[in-house]
Amino acid sequence: DADVTQTPRNRITKTGKRIMLECSQTKGHDRMYWYRQDPGLGLRLIYYSFDVKDINKGEISDGYSVSRQAQAKFSLSLESAIPNQTALYFCATSDADHTGELFFGEGSRLTVL
Amino acid sequence: KNQVEQSPQSLIILEGKNCTLQCNYTVSPFSNLRWYKQDTGRGPVSLTIMTFSENTKSNGRYTATLDADTKQSSLHITASQLSDSASYICVVSSQTGANNLFFGTGTRLTVIP
């Protein structure tokens, strides 16, 4: 089983719908992140959480919200999806050490029509 | 402003040939630099980490170099294989700030038979 699991892997939805992407991890890491990846733009940080009671906005948080339900679970919500939120979304975890290695899930491809 | 720039954006080489990918950064104060490999449809995976005191580090056919004075890193791939086809992402960590990871946009490498 993967250490960082994302569901769903693929989702097609319509403009205005609410969407939730879920992430769970078995690495025991405190730090969890949500990134989106667009061609030519690379990975951009949406939200991050350093523990269950800590939620922080990243560089592109508008239109998104998150919930850290437990140390192992971090979900990303799009309250009212719009077409420019079509992207590949990655959840990642890291240990609270100085090396900062990120462990990524397999990604969730979201298409908003 | 903390930035990471990678070149080239894309590269096509013949199987068995060598290639070098470049990463220039302006992140300060510098903590470390990682190269990640991202296969198509998968999450990125760390290849190697470079700290301030390290000039060269190898991981099999991958060799990373770091020049902390000029703020440049390279990833050299020797005797390329078809499985090296992927995107390679340079990520630089700063010593300060809660959100201290800065991403390049990646180099897309295609190895052809």
Image (cartoon, coloured by chain):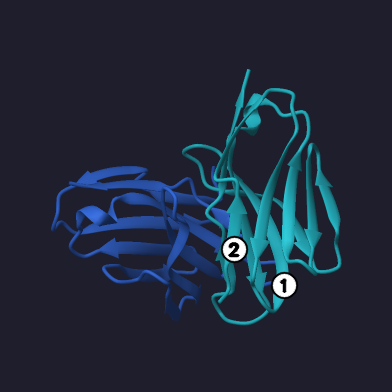
Corner quadrant of residue B49 = bottom right
Same chain for labels 1 and 2? Say yes or no: yes
Instruction: Give the quarter of the figure containing the N terminus of chain A.
Output: top right
Say which chain tag 2 marks.
B
Chain B tint as drawn: cyan
On screen, residue B111 versus residue A87, left or right, reads right
The percent coordinates of residue A23 (x first, y second) are: 42, 56
Chain A tint as drawn: blue
Could one spot residue A82 in this view of the protein?
Answer: yes
What residue would you read off at disc 2? B4
Amino acid tagged 1: Ser
On screen, residue B33 versus residue B40, left or right, reads right
Q: Residue A30 carries which label?
A: none
Q: CA separation, marks 1 and 2?
A: 14 Å
The percent coordinates of residue B63 (x first, y second) are: 80, 45
Say which chain tag 1 marks.
B
Does A27 sit above or below residue B87? Answer: below
The percent coordinates of residue B2 (x first, y second) are: 58, 73
On screen, residue A57 versus residue B36, left or right, reads left
Could one spot residue A28 in this view of the protein?
Answer: no
Q: Residue at x 44, y 50 (%)?
A: A40
Q: Which residue is drawn at 71% across and 74% down?
A: B30
Corner quadrant of residue B98 = bottom right
* Disc nearer the start of the sequence (1/2): 2
Q: Residues within 10 Å of mark 2 (few under 14, many from 20)?
A: many
Q: Which residue is drawn at 69% across and 72% down?
A: A97
The percent coordinates of residue A16 (x first, y second) are: 13, 58
Does B95 sit above or below residue A33? Answer: below
In terms of secondary structure, where does tag 1 sit? strand
What residue would you read off at disc 1? B31
